[in-house]
Amino acid sequence: MTKGSALGRLFRRGCFAVLFTALGAGLGIGLEHYLDRPKRLATRQALVIDGRPGDDRTYRLPPGTVLYFDRAFPEGHVRYRAYFYYRGEPEHDRLPLEAKHRGLLIVPAWLSAPEPDAPSLSSAGGGAGLPAPVGAER
């Protein structure tokens, strides 16, 4: 056996060890990310959804709605996601992506707890400025 072939074999074994260690680490990180479920919470009270700019109305998110954590911002607010079913397709306007959006357009609405002296959000009338719940008698 020559000295060169022993060093070559040792080098190959070292390369395989590094390769499999890197693959194992990549697989572990990938599985951890895949299995990481989003933090979720169920609201205890109806929450107020502010309308878009120019819309003075407020809307409500019913109690028990599940919100999924999306991202926390250094300014102190947190973005959540909520999922809804809708039969058919709602009336809508297309929002084309422009170059300034960099492939992502998120336009969140503000969500807040109701003011303590505000009318009840769970009443059939929906409170001041709030539409009645779906199926509620007027």
Image (cartoon, rainbow, N blue to C red):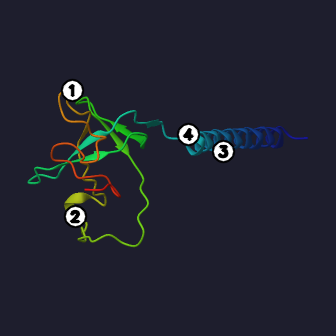
Quadrant of the drawing holding the C terminus: bottom left
Q: Earlier in the sequence, mark 3 or mark 2?
A: 3
Amino acid at the residue labelled 3: Leu
Q: Horizontal and vertical percent for residue 51?
A: 18, 50
Dot placed on the residue nearer the N-terminal end, 2 or 1: 2
Q: Write down the residue under mark 4.
A: 36
* Residue drawn at point x = 55 percent, y = 42 percent: 33
Which kind of residue does numbered mark 4 sit on?
A: Asp
Label placed on residue 99: 2
Mark 1 Cα shell of 10 Å, populated few (<14), some (14-19), many (≥20)? few
Dot 3 alpha-carbon crowd within 10 angstroms: few under 14, some 14 to 19, many 20 or more: few
Secondary structure of residue under mark 2: helix
Asked where in the image residue 27 lies, by quadrant, the reply is top right
The three-letter code of the residue at mark 1 reads Pro
Q: Which mark is residue 23?
A: 3
Residue at numbered disc 1: 116
